[in-house]
Amino acid sequence: MLSLVRFWLICVLKPRSKNTQRNDLGFTMIELLVSAVVASMIITPILFFVVDVLQTDTREEIRARSEQELQTAADFIRRDLSQAIYIYDGQGVNAIRSQLPDSQNVVLVFWRQEFIPNAVPPCDDRGDRCNDAQVYSLVAYYLQTGASDTWSGQARISRLQINGGVVDRFNQSPNCRETQCYIAGHEPDPGFDPPPDRERMNEWEASGTITQPREVLIDYIYPGVVAGLADDHCRTALNLDNATEANLLSGNKGSGFFVCVDSRNPRNTAALVNLRMNAAIRIDPNAKEFNEDRRSLFPETNFLVEGLGRYN
């Protein structure tokens, strides 16, 4: 490249005289400066192109990974809800909210049956195969936005579950005649109280302080609210013309995690779950607000689930 520039300079800028020697030694300052300018004109666009390609690859990788994380969380919630025997609608969640820890962040609450293998004696001769049991469990999903050194500055969805105990029906102790005794290792979790009759689900009260830890399901959930959803979003989505929107909705409509529950379903076991992530903040720490132009970096999903469990 420098040889071409030098040749051009010799031919154009420095016409030769008859007495000029045919060979030139070295480069002049002007030649070097012009060479540097030409080289920068060529290299700079190439560098910009390379940087743009790398940024695009990074953005697409983050978008794909975030979509996969969101879908994994959605599949988990879908499987969890499919075992529900009763799902609280917005009115029901508000009725029992005070019985749960961190009550203001509760979004989704439901009852399900938990399978406990090899829990009930008498066992077989080997002593390692007992009868199975099922207990009631109360499950709550939260949208947490509190600051944390472990998680991002965005919201996260966490899950709480408290299980009932396996009653020891073969215990003939006098104490077990007045109060229920439980098989060792299968006692009810602190605060657990069995679900009441279906008509009185909204009156459920914890038996004490719930101390079970919550487990984070997914991080980078968008904590804000995206405007644009219709006032009757839940009624339209669930095809309920005469229902009250506020009774169906749990959580902030348009937020990263909210739920619509069909309160007219005879068993209250149908729910529409809505999720949205903020993957943009993984690229730009200042991208805290939803941006329509970068919608692909705010992946969302929603799905309708009907619980298949039965409340005996």
Image: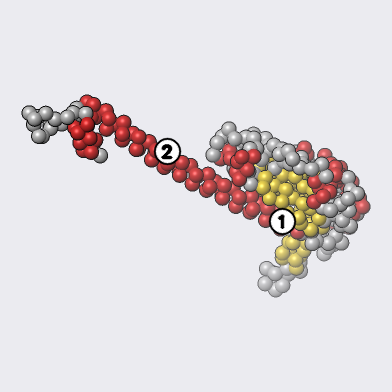
Query: Residue 130, how many percent across, how many down?
Result: 73, 68
Q: From what the image shows, is residue 132 above or below residue 45?
A: below
Q: Is residue 192 visible?
A: no
User: Which of the two residues, 129 or 135, is positioned nearer the viewer here?
Assistant: 135
Q: Residue at x 81, y 47 (%)?
A: 234
User: At label 2, which amino acid type do we have?
Assistant: Phe
* Residue wearing tag 1: 78
Q: Quadrant of the N terminus?
A: top left
How crowded pointer 1 is (Cα within 10 Å; few <14, some 14-19, many 20+) is rated as some
Q: Is residue 123 visible?
A: yes
Q: Secondary structure at mark 1?
A: helix
Query: Residue 115, how many percent across, how many down?
Result: 74, 61
Q: From what the image shows, is residue 297 above or below residue 309?
A: above
Query: Residue 267, how many percent across, how many down?
Result: 86, 57
* Residue wearing tag 2: 48
Q: From what the image shows, is residue 251 above or below residue 162?
A: above
Q: Secondary structure at mark 2?
A: helix
